Amino acid sequence: QVQLVESGGGLVQAGGSLRLSCAASGRTFSNYAMGWFRQTPGKEREFVAAINWSGRSTVTAASVKGRFTISRDNAKNTVYLQMNSLRAEDTAVYYCAADRVPTRTALTESSYTSWGQGTQVTVSS
C-alpha cells in the first residue's frame, strides 16, 4: 500500500493560484497512476484530474479544464495539481489517490486504492 501526504492547501483570493503536492512513499511510485479529487461538506467526492504512470496521459474535469493542471515527478515521488484562476466554487478539501493500474486515467473513486488525508483549499470571493 502506498502512503500519500498532500500539502499546499490554504486560503487564496479569487483569481489567485495554488499548487498542491502529494508525496508518495512505501511503494514504487511509477507503478501507480494518480488522481486528484475534491469534496465539500454534504456532497460526494468529485473527480478533478488524473495522470498515468509516465505523465504522458492526463484527463481533467470539465469544471476545471483550462485552469488546473496535473503533473508528476517520478524522481521525487510526487504528483502536483497546479490551480490557476481559482473561484469560490473551487473551495473544498482536495485529496490525492493512487491507482494500481498505472496505464489508465480513471475518473471514478472506486478505481483508486490509496488516499491521502486531504488538504483544505479555501477561495475567498
Image (cartoon, helix red, strand yellow):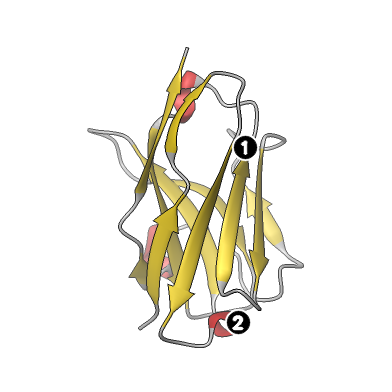
Residue 82 vs residue 100: left or right?
A: right
Residue 11 pos. (x, y %): 43, 28
Residue 49 vs residue 5: left or right?
A: right
Residue at 35% x, 62% y is: 116
Nearest to the observer: residue 119 or residue 96: 119
Q: Which corner quadrant of the image does residue 32 belong to?
A: bottom right
Q: Residue furthest top?
A: 125
Could you tell which of marks 2 and 1 lies nearer the N-terminus? Answer: 2
Q: Which corner quadrant of the image does residue 112 belong to?
A: bottom left
Nearest to the observer: residue 77 or residue 39: 77
Residue at 48% x, 47% y is: 8
Residue 123 drawn above or below residue 65:
above
Residue 40 vs residue 78: left or right?
A: left
Amino acid type shown at disc 2:
Ser
Find disc 1 in the rendering and name its residue.
62
Amino acid type shown at disc 1:
Ala
SS at circle 1: loop
Residue 89 pos. (x, y %): 46, 23
Residue at 58% x, 33% y is: 63
Residue 106 pos. (x, y %): 54, 63
Find disc 2 in the rendering and name its residue.
30
Q: How many neighbours does mark 2 have within 10 angstroms: few (below 14), some (14-19), or many (20 or more)? A: some
